Image (tube, rainbow, N blue to C red):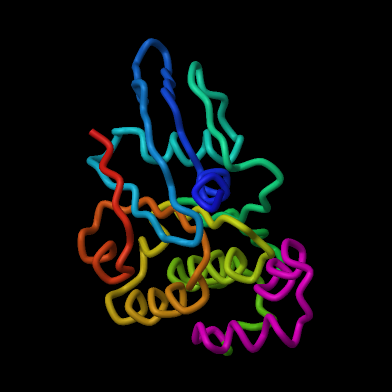
Amino acid sequence: MYGKDVEKMDIIVKDLCKSYENQKVLDHFFCRFQEGKMTCIMGKSGIGKTTLLAVLMGLVKADEGAVTGMEHKKISAIFQENRLFENLDAVTNIRITTGKSDAEIERFLQKMELKDIIGKPVSEYSGGMKRRVAIARALLAEYDILFMDEPLQGLDACTKEKVALMIKEQTNGKTVLFVTHEEKEAEFFQAERVELC
């Protein structure tokens, strides 16, 4: 009985196919993503990593195949693009999505070393600051599954290390699907690995 329950909670991808203009991106892809674990989806550029996340999130429809284990799940995502409201400040950007209090958001932004920009519109932030706001927004949302598409891109080495630690602490015991091509990142997060080829 226990084995059946676990199977229902995992995300199971069966025979997934997706093409764009006759270019096959996913070709009968099979995988199981374990609940409560971080899984790094790895592979060379253009192999279908982002497409796989988009299908799992319901943003793109697969041509064939099935996905189970996503039913009634709340999701949060860090996309490759930050997708922030440029005319609003960090706190407002995060509150709109998460419903958290300003005080809670401000405390979290301080941990992300963004205290100095609280109150300023996002349009005045550096690229690295915008990235951290996008990450904070996803981490503060209520979710069962977190999707991260190269979340640490655009961060300098020192900031990347601190933010990676924050992500690791915040997602402990959660289901996380994480696209990266960096071996070091997969090793740091001690993640399961799925290689697209």
Foreground residue, 184 or 130?
184
Residue at the spot 38% in from the left edge and 64% down from the top edge: 152
Residue 155 percent across, percent down from the top left:
36, 70
Numbered marks: total: 0
Q: State yes or no: residue 25 in magenta.
A: no
Residue shown at 20% from the left, 59% from the top: 183
Is 76 in front, or is 92?
76
Would you identify the image quadrant in which residue 87 lies?
Answer: bottom right
Tell me if 88 is positioned left or right of 26 in this view: right
Q: Residue at x 44, y 52 (%)?
A: 34
Judge left or right: residue 40 versus residue 130. Answer: left
Where on the picture, by quarter, is residue 151? bottom left
Image quarter hosting the C terminus: top left
Q: Position of residue 68 (x, y in %)?
A: 56, 35
Residue closest to the far front:
1
Q: Is residue 156 left or right of residue 50?
A: left
Classify 106 as above or below 14. below
Residue range (magenta): 89-114
Q: Residue furthest top?
A: 22
| Location of residue 100 in the rendering, given as x and y in whole percent from the top left corner | 76, 75
Residue 109 falls inside the magenta stretch: yes
- Give the main secondary structure of the magenta stretch: helix
Residue at x-position 42% and y-position 40%: 50
As drawn, 12 above or below 39 = above
Q: Is residue 19 above or below residue 40?
A: above
Above-or-below relation of 193 to 184: above
Q: Is residue 34 left or right of residue 89?
A: left
Image location of residue 175, percent across then percent down: 51, 58
Of residues 4 and 140, which is closer to you in this image? 4
